[in-house]
Structures are given as C-alpha cells and as structure tokens.
Image (cartoon, rainbow, N blue to C red):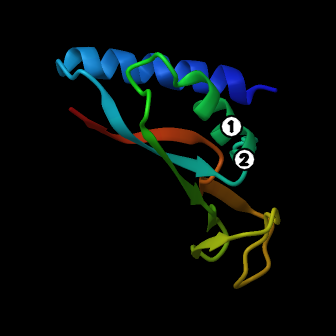
Amino acid sequence: MHEYSIVQALLNQCEEIAEQNEAQRVTKVVTKIGVMSGVETHLLQIAFDTFKEGTVCDGAEFVMNLQKLKLHCNNCGTVFEIDEHRYQCRECESLDVKVIDGEEMYLMTLEME
C-alpha cells in the first residue's frame, strides 16, 4: 500500500515547512489529488490519521481536493475536464490530446500555529 509512504513523505514535508516558519503545529493540511494519480483517497485518509500522531500534524485536519482529468486537444485546441478515464476530445473526438492536470498529488497549503 503506497499510501503509507506518500503520507510519510507528506508528514516530513509538513515538518520541514513548520520548522522553516517557526510554527509549533500544523492545524490543517490541504492537498490536491488527481483522479489519475493512483492514490486511493480513503486509504490515504486512514494512513494520515494513523501516522500523524506524535508529529507536528497531530490533530490536524486533512483536506483532499480531487482534481478531474484536464486535457488539451491538439487537434481543435479545446481544453476540457472529464471524470472518466477516456483520453478523447469531447468536441471533435480526436485521440490526439495532452494531459494538463489530474495525474499528480500536491501539497497546496498548510495552516500553522
């Protein structure tokens, strides 16, 4: 289950940012998770709740904003978002599309005290 290693890296990043900002604790962690990132959000939540204890994030709220798959059609220039895992332009039905967003996970913001 790679969600555990993702959370460990996320907590390490939170520790570093809190230290750089001389914060005692993190109260809220906001992430953006792409639908094609391969991250199972329910498992990520469980891992975060399990591993945050005893860290700077102990008691922190964990927010996961899901990012739809965002594509650019190289044929007609349309930029669009889709929920499904279908790499096809919704306007001209071309398969010549480029992924713009929705494949990665990012730490967006931290609220700290």
Q: Give left or right: position of 77 versus 56.
A: right
Q: Is residue 55 above or below residue 44?
A: above
Position of residue 103 relative to residue 90, above or below, is above
Which amino acid is tagged 1? Ile
Tell me, yes or no, whether the two marked residues, 2 and 1, touch with CB atoms within 8 Å.
yes
Residue appearing at x 63%, y 77% in the figure: 76
Residue 26 position by quadrant: top left
Please provide percent x and percent y for residue 17: 30, 22
Say which amino acid is labelled 2.
Answer: His
Q: Which residue is mark 2?
A: 42
The N terminus, quarter of image:
top right
* Residue 86 placement (x, y as % from top left): 82, 66
Q: Which mark is residue 46?
A: 1
Which quadrant would residue 81 be assigned to in this image?
A: bottom right
Q: Please, what secondary structure does the residue beneath circle 2 have?
A: helix
**Above or below, 39 relative to 84:** above
